[in-house]
Amino acid sequence: MPEISIITPFYNSEKYLEQCIKSVLEQNFENFELILINDGSNDNSFKIAQKFEQDKRIKIFSKENEGQGTARNYALKKAQGEIILYLDSDDWLEENALFKIYQKYRQDNPDIIFFNAYKFFEETKIKNEYRYIDSYFLRYKENIFSIKNAFDIIFNTGGLPFRAYKKDFLIKNNIKYSNTRFIEDSEFYIKALLYADKITCLNEYIVNYRVHKNSTTFTQNNRIKTIKDTFFVCENILKNSKYYTNKEITNSFLNNRLRQLFYYFSICDKKNRKKYFYMFKSIAKYIKTTYTFDFIQKNTQFLKLNDIINCTYESYELRKRLSLIKLFLKHYF
């Protein structure tokens, strides 16, 4: 039986898939299985995957195109390993990555392992260190932690490529990806963090995370609805957990969700910005009327959030421009 199951869905990934697969096969740790899910590709991706199927550790499945989240859930049912590592088809592993994960897992027996990554920018070919675990590692180092003692930082980041999971933990708590084709990992990582009793940090660079130019904007109207729906689905996960009455954890969760909302607002294309604004406004009003609003006073986005609640789209944009002008004048004059 394999110790580690690497799950890699692919859809039209002919440009990167071979590098991804080779990075797994070249590991010095050999007791793994690589589950490749062809999510309805119509390029040469499937043929590239088939080149490696003579290796008995590789399992290839094909299904109709339903998105990465559905493909990952499908693969988890097939996985036999004790440890689950999700690896996107355009990313690749560092040398000795699997052995380091395995060692850490045997040492701590955690539900989740956090680790670092390199960010590789496709356009410039620049590779930077991404210290994903720092806010956790600086406090806990080699110690086990969970939401109980790390509530203020637990939701600081998302990060599919920067974690490994105990399979039994995922199955026991029914932790799955959303079937949406956009931010499908939000529900997964929110529930995982809420339900994990043992989280540990591996202070190593494990994955190379490829950043694409077209990942910085979105233009489809239905994605705005997905962002709104995701907020309420994640809130429902919190409500169904034992921590919903814990003010500190609820505040931390809301701050995380607001950071996500502000982020997508900042990259929203001009065509859909007004529609996004009023979607955001409806959620902000809901938060203010449903929860004690004092928590947001500590958030640097507090004034912006109040502006969204109290302004029309036109007046909000005007205030933003005026603040930029004031900043410019103050800086140069």
Image (tube, grey):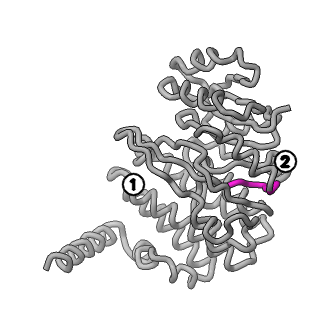
**Residue 285's disc number:** none
111 drawn magenta: yes
Question: Which residues make up the magenta segment?
Answer: 108-114
Q: Position of residue 48 (x, y in %)?
A: 57, 18
The quadrant in which residue 329 appears is bottom left
Q: Residues within 10 Å of mark 1 (few under 14, many from 20)?
A: some
Q: Is residue 287 left or right of residue 79?
A: left
The residue at which mark 1 appears reads as: 267
The residues tagged by marks 1 and 2 sit, at their Cα atoms, a distance apart of 37 Å
Q: Which label's residue is closer to the chain start, 1 or 2?
A: 2
Return the residue nearer the eye: 238 or 107: 107
Amino acid type of the residue tagged 2 in the rendering: Asp
Rendered residue at 57%/60% (across/down): 157
Q: Residues within 10 Å of mark 2 (few under 14, many from 20)?
A: some
Position of 44 relative to 242 (above/below): above
SS of the residue under disc 2: helix
Give above or below for 4 relative to 136. Answer: above
Q: Using residue 198 as the reference point, say whether residue 183 is left or right of it.
A: left
The N terminus lies in which quarter of the figure?
top right
Q: Amino acid at mark 1?
A: Ile
Q: Would you name the residue on which mark 2 appears? A: 168
Where is residue 107 drawn, in percent x and y? 80, 54
Check whether the beta carbons of the residues at disc 1 and disc 2 lie within 8 A of each other.
no
Say which element carries label 1: helix
Pinpoint residue 241: horizontal percent, then vertical percent: 78, 66
Magenta region includes residue 203: no
Where does the C terminus fall, quadrant-wise?
bottom left
**Residue 157 in view (yes/no):** yes
Numbered disc in front, either 1 or 2: 2
**Nearest the eye: 29 or 196:** 29
Q: Position of residue 254 (x, y in %)?
A: 60, 70
